[in-house]
Amino acid sequence: MAALSVLTDTAGDDERRQGLRRMRLVALGLLLLAALVYVLTLGKDGAWGYVNAGAEASMVGAIADWFAVTALFRHPLGLPIPHTALIPRKKDQLARSLQEFMGANFLREEIIRERVLAAQVADRAAAWVLDPRHTKRAADEVAALTVAGLRRLRDDSVTGLLDEAVLPRLREEPISPIAGTFLGEVVRDGAHHGLVDLAVAEAHRWLLANEATFSAVLEERAPWWAPNRVNEVVIKRVYLEAIAWVEDIRDDPMHQTRQALDDLLEQLSRDLLTDPDTQERAERLKRRLLDHPQLLATATSLWSAFRTALIGSLEQPDSPLRERIQAQLRTFAEHVRADVALRARLDGYAADLAVFFTERYGDELMTVISHTIERWDGVETAEKVELHVGRDLQFIRINGTIVGGLVGVLIHTVTVLTGH
């Protein structure tokens, strides 16, 4: 496995290096000061004896703590003393220990759930989306991701999915209960009215643009013995009545033809659920459609055309589809901000998702720590760690010097008082 360099922050490392150097000089200065005081007070009695004892102990404390701090990162004085240079030698073991500690104490369900819920993800996301700049950006991202997914979904993959999974399932599943329930819901909700409006409008447009075709069809069915003039008058009258009838249906939402269609669809939905003959006819129709040799090719072709049209619309920055996506995002964001219960549910879903990924992939995620540190060079790792914590560790040397001096004075005091 190739060695991996530790990432560096040049500007930050320079500042840390200067801070470490200053603290080392302070710690070394205190040691030299203690040594100078010790030499100057050596052999003197009285109060100077206390100073001498304190200086001696300060030197001992300073040197011992220097050894301890240095032993973490390298061999003191370059001597291969056992149990020194701990970080270069033990970095892999330390990495595994760090990995286990992080996994056991941070990737816990209650901690993850608490932090996700405290973040109020739904409210913050909704507020972000309501910013017009962010709304457009979010819509652009949705469009880009959708286009990328559609481009990667090849026609042969769709064909295989239909042939191996969808169509066999449709053959096994009775169509009548599904179709009857769906059709009943459509009729009750009036969801088909838009389709009826579209069909009526198209029929009206076709009649206006194709009078000659309409007349030719009727003329073919006219009695051979009827005079041409009579046929022309009758056909013209039928044509005008057809246009008027279609216009009435188009302009009157409560037209009896519309109501008759609603009744027909409602009766069909009931028959699909309850009438054995209708159910059998529906099953036969389903089997004929599914067994048709062109079904798979037609379905794939329809999908390909739909995908091409959808990609083209999504790639246009100002397309109606993108505007619709932005409008839906804003509407949903406003609904989220206004509905406390919805925000709570969404935050709960986010917490559940975070916990799921943590439980499923947490161990693999934590191995990044050990695998990465194992690839670091030991000496480079020690230098990097020392840059980050070495300055604070120098306070151990400083404290050792000061505390050692105080303990030395205390021991000397006890010695004098006990007469030893």
Image: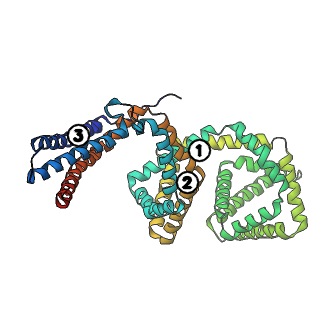
Measure how far apart labels 3 and 2 are at the Cα level: 42 Å
Which of the labelled discs sits on residue 358, or is there none? 2
Does label 3 or label 2 sit earlier along the sequence? 3
Q: Identify the residue shown where x is 59% and y is 44%.
A: 310
Task: Give the number of the mark in front: 3 or 2.
Answer: 3
The amino acid at mark 2 is Thr
Total marks placed = 3
Q: Which residue is mark 1?
A: 310
User: Is 308 on the left or on the right of 419, as rendered?
Assistant: right
Q: Residues within 10 Å of mark 3 (few under 14, many from 20)?
A: many
Can residue 244 be seen from the camera position used here? yes
Residue matched to label 3: 24
Q: Earlier in the sequence, mark 3 or mark 1?
A: 3
Residue at the (43%, 53%) spot, across then down: 135
Give the crowd class for mark 1: few <14, some 14-19, many >=20 residues within 10 Å.
some
- Tell me where residue 146 sits by quadrant: top right
Earlier-in-chain disc, 1 versus 2: 1
- Expressed as whole percent of the image width and height from the top left, the position of residue 3 reads 47, 29
Who's the residue at 12% across and 50% down the image?
49
